[in-house]
Image (cartoon, rainbow, N blue to C red):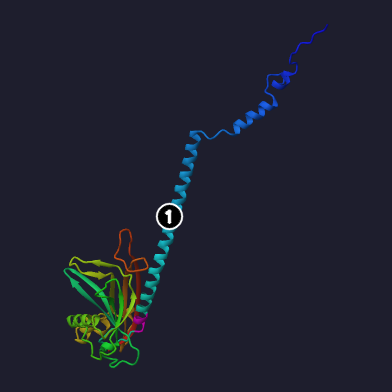
Amino acid sequence: MCQFQNKPVFGKLFRGNGFGKPSYRSRHALSRRQQRRGLTLAELLIASTIMAMMTVGMASLAFTVETGNRHAKNLGIATQHARVAIGRIERALYSAHTSEQFPGFAVFSETEGSYSFPDTLVIWHLTGAPQDPDGLPRFNELVIFCPDPSAPNKLLEITVPSDTRTVPDLNDESTWLSELSSIKSSQGATVVQLTDLLRSATTQGAVTRGAVRFIATVRPTEDEWTDYKDGNKAWEEIAWVQDIYGSQTGLRQSWCRFELQLMPGEKAVREPAGVRPIPFFGSAAIHYELHK
């Protein structure tokens, strides 16, 4: 009688392929285990470092863009204020009325210790016919540009329409300073604010002043003209502008240069740390004849 041995003849087909390689089922299970494997600590650290660097870079870029935009905006505001103020001053200078006694405009300075502050400009600016075209102007024919004494960050344009008095002689500087001080604080004066961004600084005398200055140059000078009138200088020896003169008339020039420093921003500030004032410059000249 034949006996059959119960041996798993085909077992190897399920355990392997006969060449030492795992079966299909084994390979599939191994692949699923590999897919479930997470990141190592080193990989997490590297990824975190890269993300942190990208975050810092983006934040720095955003801050730079915001800072640049704010600076450009503040610079634009200051430039617009300067354009208005300079344009207003220059138009008044170009239309100034002149005479032998008053060269169209004059600059007056206040002195503190050894320092002089030429921050007040007076212009003979007419809206009609002058009361004395060959003499001195009236106070109501003047326009005054100066900082506000009570708020030096403000640049003002002042007129006194109701004051019909004749102004003092230009050589009487003390009377001029007294009159100008009264006008600046007068309730009857008409005041126009040109800007409130004027840089203000405290002097050694603990006085806060606005950073604006005017320089007036007249050729021939008052001293030269006085010497000629007194007979101490010949007509031909006068320093005429571009040497232009005739037998009876000569060319005179009144020239004004000015500088104002404005703080960039939307409102008045007192020079905060890290913010620098911006200087702006203007000038205007008028020419007229002097008669022998």
As drawn, which residue projects farthest toward the front?
Answer: 1
| Up/down of 105 relative to 39, above or below | below
Residue receiving disc 1? 63
Q: Nearer the viewer, residue 280 or 202?
A: 202
Q: Amino acid at mark 1?
A: Phe
Residue 185 at x, y percent in the picture: 23, 80
Magenta stretch: helix, strand or loop mostly? helix
Looking at the image, residue 264 sits to the left or right of residue 139; the answer is: right
Q: How many marks?
A: 1
Residue 218 at x, y percent in the picture: 28, 79
**What residue range appears in magenta?**
91-95
* Displayed quadrant of residue 35: top right
Q: Residue at x 35, y 91 (%)?
A: 128
Residue 234 at x, y percent in the picture: 24, 84
Looking at the image, residue 1 sits to the left or right of residue 272; the answer is: right
Secondary structure found at label 1 = helix
Q: Nearer the viewer, residue 40 or 204?
A: 40
As drawn, which residue projects farthest toward the left?
Answer: 113
Residue 93 on the magenta segment: yes
